[in-house]
């Protein structure tokens, strides 16, 4: 085995298991007696866990303020929250929600220590570099998808004609604590479980085959794929209330965040961020819809160029098929077929459902990239991926 040089970023203190959300009050208290709670607009706020949390906070004499994030966070939303709470002597920030809520809380915890707009610090948009000084931040995901609870960046969106999705990023922005309580995901509707699950799968696969992968990210990505393989479909169907299935998905999602933070992603995310800048389309849906064709095109090109990388796709094909001695070519074919099958079973929406038209392809392609894909797809290949999932 040859191990090339690599780095591995810090990960949050991880607390995993059913009912572990109950630990968060002690953790909040350890930082001080005033906290900002960031949630989504719906599911968690009508759950018994929200009632219990408020009761516990009051028992511990913790003063709390609230921010509701009801869409992907924009610079305006983050700047407003910072203005509203900057003088409240907050000691920590906790996000309880999906990827958007966690990204928002991460960004707010980082911007409460700064004096200008978040726009100034966004990669590729602003001119400043964040210094990494932030308030303690606790991430409690209620979906199993983006892996944001493990990453050092917050994705901020500005959706309009010349829109962008850009990251606030610093090594210190990795959440201090991540609490993965699969009970919080039991009530997720199938379409959200499906989109989030496909995002987690895409992130695990793209970081596993990434040109920046290391033996550590490989081990974690494969562990995540093994947890996900028999749980992704079930989490969206009859077993959606099964805590073991939901725990597998929460674990896979978390690992996808760790591996993407350390190995990067591929062409699916390179196209998804471009589409996400122009259209109001959930990140999981856009990744899920593009994944099958993007994997097929990447494997096709690796084959035509006789390039390295097929071995890793084949390894994933063997895991998903359960056939350990399947040859490389058959394993890759199995993987392609399986992702197409999952996309259909999960009824992942096509792009036109969110207003994307063929006339938009040029501007999408212009802003797309391959990231760390094992082979570079050209503009026409990206056009073919988009065309296959238009409508
Ligand atoms: Fe993603």
Image (cartoon, rainbow, N blue to C red):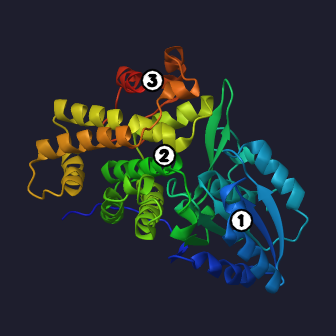
- Does the CB distance between marks 1 and 3 fall below 8 Å? no
Report if the beta carbon of the residue with label 2 is closer than 8 angstroms to ligand 1: no
Inspect this view and state whether residue 308 appears.
no
Mark 1 and mark 3: Cα distance apart in space: 43 Å
- Would you name the residue on which mark 2 appears? 195
Q: Nearer the viewer, residue 22 or 261?
A: 22
Identify the image quadrant of residue 238.
bottom left
* For marks 1 and 2 on the same chain, the one whose residue lies earlier in the sequence: 1
49 sits left or right of 275 in the view: right
Report if the beta carbon of the residue with label 1 is closer than 8 angstroms to ligand 1: no
Alpha-carbon neighbours of circle 2 within 10 Å: few (<14), some, or many (≥20)?
Answer: many
Residue 183 placed where, x, y %?
54, 69
The residue lying at 55 percent from left, 56 percent from top is 188
264 sits left or right of 163 in the view: left
269 sits left or right of 32 in the view: left
- Would you name the residue on which mark 1 appears? 133
Identify the image quadrant of residue 67.
bottom right
Residue 184 placed where, x, y %?
58, 66
* Residue lying furthest top: 359
The vertical placement of 295 against 312, above or below, is above
Residue 323 placed where, x, y %?
13, 56
- Would you name the residue on which mark 3 appears? 390
Alpha-carbon neighbours of circle 3 within 10 Å: few (<14), some, or many (≥20)?
Answer: many
Mark 1 and mark 2: Cα distance apart in space: 33 Å
The residue lying at 44 percent from left, 66 percent from top is 242
């Amino acid at each position: 085995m040859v191990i090339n040089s690599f780095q591995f970023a810090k990960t949050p203190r991880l607390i995993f298991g059913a009912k572990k959300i109950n630990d968060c009050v002690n953790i909040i208290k350890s930082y001080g007696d005033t906290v900002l709670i960031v949630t989504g607009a719906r599911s968690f706020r009508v759950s018994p866990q929200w009632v219990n949390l408020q009761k516990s906070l009051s028992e511990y004499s913790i003063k709390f303020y609230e921010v509701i994030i009801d869409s992907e966070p924009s610079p305006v939303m983050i700047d407003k929250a910072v203005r509203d709470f900057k003088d409240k002597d907050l000691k920590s920030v906790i996000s309880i929600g999906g990827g958007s809520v966690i990204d928002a809380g991460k960004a707010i915890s980082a911007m409460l220590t700064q004096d200008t707009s978040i726009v100034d610090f966004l990669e590729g948009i602003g001119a400043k570099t964040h210094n990494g000084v932030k308030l303690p931040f606790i991430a409690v995901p209620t979906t199993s998808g983006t892996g944001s609870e493990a990453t050092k960046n917050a994705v901020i969106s500005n959706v309009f004609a010349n829109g962008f999705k850009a990251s606030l990023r610093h090594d210190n922005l990795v959440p201090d604590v991540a609490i993965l309580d699969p009970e919080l995901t039991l009530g997720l509707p199938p379409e959200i479980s499906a989109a989030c699950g496909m995002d987690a799968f895409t992130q695990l696969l793209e970081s596993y085959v990434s040109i920046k992968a290391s033996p550590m990210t490989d081990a974690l990505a494969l562990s995540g794929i093994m947890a996900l393989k028999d749980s992704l479909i079930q989490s969206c169907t009859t077993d959606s209330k099964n805590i073991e299935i939901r725990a597998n998905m929460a674990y896979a999602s978390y690992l996808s965040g760790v591996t993407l933070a350390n190995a990067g992603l591929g062409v699916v995310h390179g196209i998804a961020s471009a589409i996400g800048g122009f259209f109001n389309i959930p990140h999981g849906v856009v990744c899920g819809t593009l994944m099958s064709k993007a994997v097929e095109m990447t494997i096709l090109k690796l084959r035509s160029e006789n390039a390295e990388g097929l071995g890793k796709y084949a390894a994933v094909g063997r895991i998903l098929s359960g056939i350990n001695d399947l040859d490389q070519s058959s394993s890759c074919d199995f993987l392609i077929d399986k992702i197409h099958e999952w996309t259909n079973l999960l009824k992942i929406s096509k792009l036109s459902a969110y207003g994307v038209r063929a006339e938009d392809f040029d501007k999408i392609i212009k802003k797309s990239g391959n990231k760390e894909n094992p082979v570079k797809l050209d503009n026409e290949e990206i056009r073919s991926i988009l065309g296959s999932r238009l409508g």
